[in-house]
Image: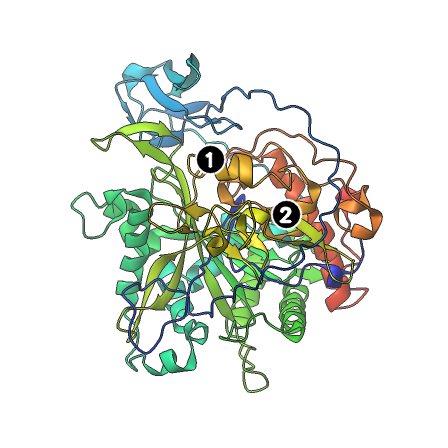
Amino acid sequence: MPSAMGNARRSILVGLCLTSGVLFSCGGGKPADKTPKPDPFADPRPADPVPAPGPADPVPTKPPAPPVAKDSPPEFFPTHIKKVGVGQTVSFGVPVIDQDLDETVVEVTKLPASAKFDAITQTITWTPAKADQPKAEFEVHISQPGKGLVEAKTFSIEVADAKQELPVAEPQSAVIETLLMIRQPARLAVVNKNWPLDKMLRWAADNFPPQFTDENRARLDKKPLNTKKLFEQFLTEQAVTHKNPRLDPKAKEFDKKSFGDPKSWKIVALRPRIDKAWTELRVVYQAVNAPEPVFAMFRIRPVVEYVPALPRPEEERIANNKIFLGMVAKHLLKDGGPREDFLKDQAAHAKAVGAFMNEFMAFNDSKKAKYLRTFSIGIAMEARMGGGSARKEDGSYKSGDGWAWHALKPFQTQDAKTQAYVNVTIPGFWTMTVPSKDGKTWEPKCGPRWTAGTPENPGGFEAICRKTMGFVDLPDQTGEKVKSSRIDAVNLFLEHKQVHMVKDLDLHDGRRDVGEENGVPCSTCHIRNFGMHDYSDLANVDPSKGVPKTRNKKIATLNFVIIPTTHWEEFTLEFLKHQECRGKQMLEEFIGPDAAKGLTCPLAK
């Protein structure tokens, strides 16, 4: 892999994915004019001009064709909870994954009387009773109507007299636990005290107006934003995405205990993404009282995206990376590597993490250059609250896994006087890739289907091509015109994901890894059964080496993990190795050759 991250793709995807263990955003559209638009979701950035058709870029020779696809059977993943105590409430999902995205119906057909199953969110909540001893039996019924498949899976959980310790993902190395995936509660104690969710929501909104044009910024009221109202908007938009009134503060079904108190949302991971072309901090909150997994991930950088100065000049990317990586090195590294003493002393690490975040969030050198100020791009949202479940006419569960992804930004309201958190369009796929102009890396390019004037374009599909960034959004075709979607789920956009997206760039083509979030949207990332590209095949990142001769290796299927809780997934650990490799290069490029002498590249070994 080339040593200089300067060869990395220069354009940014103002967007999402988990995603990741990874959460996980952001819109297209036209700028507001003097008259308030009826659509408050409009992106304030100028729309890309549609260029006249011209000679097509050369399409590089494709790597070896993938083997003929075989029909993938649905995979069931029983809970990692093996033993609970009487009176101890536990919640867990019943995930079933089909890599072919075939319609899959999951029903729990046997469970103890003391347990309840919510089919919409695919969640079992259980408080064992004495009568459940010595163990409780569960049966999950899996069917695929389109294939005539029907099968049952069973598992049991032991019931003890006393409360039991539940499974916790085992500790990893210092580079993971103290740098790349800071996720143990004691390490997050200081940042949780300093940055409750409502404070973060208010901070992000207060610092967002540079996204608006000068004219629209001038129309904002001078009075402060209402923090409580921002939090309610945050919840309301989730209810819209998932069609679940338990998330809606105005609904009688609102689950106030799980979602209504900002203090019940805790930071469960701090992820310094030192591996990205534009480095950033990802702050992951979770509604810890909810039986279902519900996450909100803020993406934060020390550089403001001013409008209309897009695409941003290279000097801003350099400033962004030097500032962010410098703070990471100052607070979290020692002699160019992770601090082993922090691995043992979680309290000392928590103080360092708190100091790092406070300095980072307070950064403001805008007098030197207007873009030098910490800024939150948006909030990547992911939850198993029903957005990924198809419904019957009466609203009951039909099929699906409950997981859905969306993104929030604090845009101006319709009257332009204030701001509101709203769902925005979210990014999709790399559909094609070509060598960069300097020939040193691969860049995304919208395929012919999403290019104006091509025979492959059915008409209007160029609207979801982000030309300056080269990728294609997920297609919402519910109206007369194709537009970018504000939601992603496994059960949506099947033709796009299975046919059009992979026509010119196979899903397992390692060149996707050059892009943010590996060139795939959230749902695809979170059910993947393939790992990172082959580091020994340099063509995956360097066009001068030809085209890749290898495909991404097969691994165990990733099971919707946003952050490790009960266990580590194979892909999560491999992706963290990839981040260390890229992070080492970034630190060496922007801070100096000794800045990463204590880091390695595990995937290159």
Badge 2 element: loop
Return the residue at label 2. 432
Question: Helix, strand or loop at disc 1?
Answer: helix
Q: Residue drawn at (67%, 50%), measured in percent from left and top?
A: 433
Residue 262 versus residue 590: which sits nearer the camera? Answer: 590
x then y, percent, for residue 129: 28, 21
- Cα separation, mark 2 vs mark 1, equals 18 Å
The image quadrant that residue 279 belongs to is bottom right
* Above or below: residue 204 compared with residue 169: below
Residue 12 location, x and y as percent?
A: 59, 61
Q: Residue furthest left?
A: 252
In front here: 585 or 270? 585
Tell me the kind of residue under disc 2: Met
Residue designated by label 1: 494
The quadrant the C terminus occupies is top right
Which residue ends up furthest to the bottom in the rendered image? 367
